[in-house]
Image (cartoon, rainbow, N blue to C red):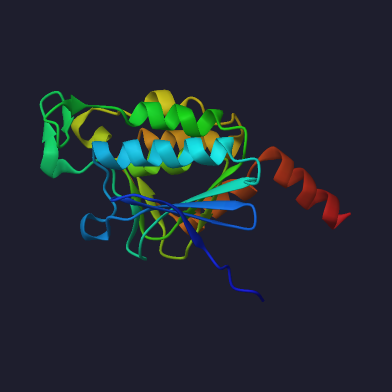
Amino acid sequence: MTQPQWKEARRFEDVRYEKWQGIAKVTINRPEVRNAFRPQTLFELSAAFEDAREDPDVGVVILTGQGNDAFCSGGDQRIRGDQGYVGKDGVPRLNVLDLQKQIRSLPKPVVAMVAGYAIGGGHVLHVVCDLTIAADNARFGQTGPKVVASTADSALRRSPRSSASRRRRRSGSSAASTTRSRRCRWAWSTPSSRWRSSKRKR
């Protein structure tokens, strides 16, 4: 099997952006904080997705995180202020919703490749993608419900209305984390999957 020969498409500080044979790969590259995002990270992710959208040679986008410990652990709490996450310019922002809407409206499929934790805002990023491929150690969950708050509601409401995605949305409003194997069982419990399974038994 040919190994992808990824080539850097544009240089960023918090993100790796590469392309290969019609595929754009966007990697959150902050493993020292489990790929938590800050305002700069979100601006760079947005720029990468915009480039992928406009490039006629790109047919699909992969979103992932650097390393095996985490896909994304949400916002970097070290720089969180009362009004949002404070960037280098000193301006507090809560601009992750803009990125979520950008991913959902992208006219090309976006595939999340999740290894390790997808928690909080990182959990929402995988939810708004069209497809998630989860490693054996993938773990999904929300932290907001533990303090009776969920910033993920608007993005979670945008996910498709299948039985599996309803459970996925419920997990976004629950403090309990879920594993890859449990989500696989959810996927197989959709009506269309049960129909296919019963048809094979005939």
Q: Nearer the viewer, residue 65 or 73?
A: 65
Q: Residue furthest bottom?
A: 1
* Residue 129 in view, yes or no: no
* Residue 154 in view, yes or no: yes
At a point 46% along the width and 65% down the height, the residue shown is 136
The image quadrant that residue 165 belongs to is top right
Provide residue 27's location: percent of width, then percent of height. Answer: 41, 53
Whether residue 25 sits left or right of residue 11 in the image: it is right
Provide residue 46's location: percent of width, then percent of height. Answer: 41, 36
Q: Nearer the viewer, residue 32 or 126?
A: 32
Q: Residue furthest right?
A: 202
The image quadrant that residue 143 belongs to is top left
Q: Quadrant of the N terminus?
A: bottom right
Vertical position of residue 66 compared to residue 96: above or below: below
Provide residue 7's location: percent of width, then percent of height. Answer: 50, 61
Q: Nearer the viewer, residue 131 or 142?
A: 131
Q: Quadrant of the C terminus?
A: bottom right
Q: How many marks?
A: 0
The image quadrant that residue 98 belongs to is top left
Vertical position of residue 135 compared to residue 175: above or below: below
At a point 62% along the width and 38% down the height, the residue shown is 108
Q: Nearer the viewer, residue 88 or 114?
A: 88
Vertical position of residue 109 compared to residue 101: above or below: below
Provide residue 137's location: percent of width, then percent of height. Answer: 41, 64
At a point 57% along the width and 35% down the height, the residue shown is 54
Whether residue 201 sits left or right of residue 71 in the image: it is right
